[in-house]
Amino acid sequence: MYRRTLIGLLATTAMTATLVVGTAATVAPQATADVGAAVVTITYSDARAGEFKDAVAQGVAVWNANVTSVRIQKAASGQRADVQVIADPGWPRATLGPVRPGGSGTVWYGREAVADGYNLVRIASHEFGHILGLPDIKPGPCSSLMSGSTGGVSCTNVNPNASERNRVQSIYANGFAPTATNTVVIG
């Protein structure tokens, strides 16, 4: 009797888990936490981000909603930031990470792309993708965040696709991330 009850309980639990997964697949992608995995926290400073502070915060929020192995948060006043965001007149570009705590990365939020009409939050999300270790995927479709400008001016997709999310999850898995490189990616 005990064995039959246990098997029934396991079958019911499996069906419930299937229903929950099935329901989650119909809504926007959400990050799920890995039980017991360490989370890497990277800080950024928007002190030099000029008029793009809100777009940067929204781009950071996109990544925080899509991955769980790394969190990006604004550095507290007086705290050293791992990533500097700088508004400049050129094309957007960023240090190719992965950047880790104590590392050093820069996002240059270029006004040239803004003047051309590219989506402000997509620019921020894309450049933080580089900080997290993702290279450009060009040419690429709008559905790929890392396609950058090849998605076109009309592309407003600010979210990484499944492959991009999985790559960042893998890079920062178990709290480990290699030291940042000094490569700058334009785009």
Image (cartoon, rainbow, N blue to C red):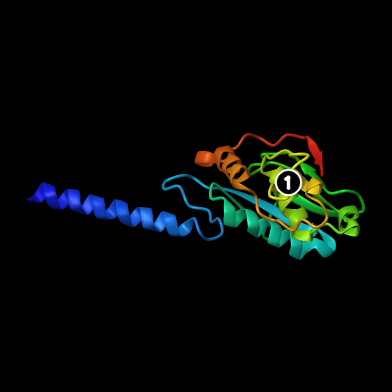
Looking at the figure, which quarter contains the C terminus? top right
Residue 154: give x, y in percent of width and height. Answer: 80, 57
- Foreground of the two, 42 or 166: 166
Q: Secondary structure at mark 1?
A: loop
Residue 16: give x, y in percent of width and height. Answer: 32, 57
Q: Is residue 119 visible?
A: yes
* Side (left or right) of 174 relative to 50: left
Residue 155: give x, y in percent of width and height. Answer: 77, 55
Q: Which residue is mark 1?
A: 141
* Residue at the (64%, 59%) spot, across then down: 61
Query: Which quadrant would residue 99 be assigned to in this image?
Result: top right
Dot 1 alpha-carbon crowd within 10 angstroms: few under 14, some 14 to 19, many 20 or more: some
Residue 170: give x, y in percent of width and height. Answer: 55, 38
Judge whether 54 appears above or below 122 on screen. Answer: below
Query: Which quadrant would residue 119 be assigned to in this image?
Result: bottom right
* Residue at the (78%, 49%) spot, across then down: 151
* Residue at the (43%, 55%) spot, across then down: 22
* Side (left or right) of 137 relative to 153: left
- Foreground of the two, 57 or 138: 138
Judge whether 140 appears above or below 119 on screen. Answer: above
